[in-house]
Image (spheres, rainbow, N blue to C red):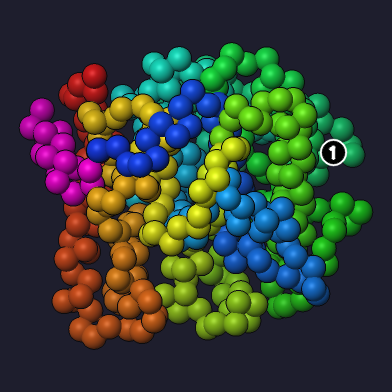
Amino acid sequence: DSEISEIETYMKEETGSKESSEMFGVAEDKNVIFVSIESFQNYLLDSEINGTETTPFLNDLKERNDTIWFENFYHQTAQGKTSDSEFIVENSLYPLDRGSVYFTHAQNEYNALPEILNQNEYETTVFHANNKSFWNREVMYDNIGYDEFYGEESFEETEENSFGWGLEDKDFFEQSIPYLEDQEQPFYSKFITLTHHFPFELPEEKANIDKHDSGSQTLNDSFQTARYTDEAVEVFFNELKESGLYEDSIIVLMGDHYGISEFHNKAMGEFIGKEINGYEHMQLQRVPFMIHIPGYEDGENSDEVVGQIDVKPTLLNLLGIEDEKDLTFGTDMFSDDRKGFIAMRDGSFVSDDYIYTDSICYDRETGEEIDPEEEACAPVREKVDQELQYSNDIIYGDLFRFYDFK
Ligand code: GP9
Ligand code: MN
């Protein structure tokens, strides 16, 4: 098929080198524990409510030498929310402009991360204490090669440990440990948290931080669930250490998408001390992304502009798995040869120099509007539109049927 070769050529030229970076194989044969943290945005990190840190554990973790924290990591999800974030991470393709790929194209041919890891002797599993059919996960997971999906029936819910969307994150992690211990190693296991999900509901006795005080109840309540989930991640780390799995694993933490929508811009603007225009809105789409490698000592923070699209090639590189023939719109985050922009589904983008959204081109560094926008942002805008179109073509046309990944 000629279209897939055109896309292949584009990727070879534009989406950066597939050559291995200096981090190649740093995590070879390690288990990968991937934690998708529900609705977590970067504004939570290092924030305080009445003098109390919202995320003390994550704040500490991101600065450690055994953690690489990407402070300019953007989510790229659209209507498919969590499922979009999963799809982007697994495939390094963009989500669709309408609906969720997990629902609309669950039967397509993919070359997804779990399949590749399976071929490299990994056991691949997902843990998420919700109904298996939510986002059509059961069907999609099966197609893209996950060996096992531990859904809500694998967990014990009681009146004490369940509220809001269901099982609370601390119990979710604790109850997952025996299943993890039973797995063949090395494994790739994805955990999807739930407690810090709109409407950010938490029983008062479980809250270890005050609510914020603003005109938005949503924003106000979000700090309590964020703090709770921060504690849950700490519980998980401790349990992993106790079980002995910690040393043989790397732990990747990622926020799946925004939690506070633009309807709360006034309260959010007051909280971060900035008026929220297009530029600030884009900057609010940054979510935590940390790669924690026990025993690693050179983990610095990175200010590279990166996003969910880059996760797959980055992980394969860390694990020392060659992927020259893979077709991805993302690039290894550690590569020196990156394409220099992160595209959002609506055509907005963040490049090394500019931020473009709603037809306005901003200087990324200063946030100033650049006039005339056409000249500065146009070259990247063209590539963004091209990539989004190609990605749609791949999905709508099921084009990977015509490509040999081996
Ligand atoms: C549902 C959970 C939340 O299982 O992943 O989904 P979201 O509403 O964030 O897409
Ligand atoms: Mn979500």
Q: Is residue 299 above or below residue 34?
A: below
Q: Amino acid at mark 1?
A: Asn
Residue 366 at least partly seen: yes
In the rendered image, which quarter contains the N terminus?
top left
> Viewed as shown, does residue 116 lie left or right of 155?
left
- Residue 153 in percent (x, y) is at 72, 23
Give the crowd class for mark 1: few <14, some 14-19, many >=20 residues within 10 Å. some
Q: For the residue labelled by badge 1, is the local secondary structure a helix, a strand or a loop? A: loop
> Viewed as shown, does residue 93 lie left or right of 173?
left
Residue 225 at least partly seen: no
| Front one among 23 and 277 | 23
| Front one among 327 and 266 | 327
Q: Is residue 2 magenta?
A: yes
Residue 380, picture quadrant: bottom left
Residue 25, picture quadrant: top left
Residue 43, picture quadrant: bottom right
The residue shown at (69%, 65%) is 218
The residue shown at (18%, 24%) is 402
The residue shown at (41%, 18%) is 120
The residue shown at (34%, 50%) is 97
Residue at the disc numbered 1: 161
* Label 1 residue near ligand 1, CB within 8 Å: no
Q: Is residue 278 magenta?
A: no
In the rendered image, which quarter contains the C terminus?
top left
What are the residue bounds of the magenta stretch? Answer: 1-18
Main SS of the magenta part reads helix
> Viewed as shown, does residue 98 lie left or right of 248?
left
Q: Is residue 318 above or below residue 16?
A: above
> Viewed as shown, does residue 76 lie left or right of 293?
left
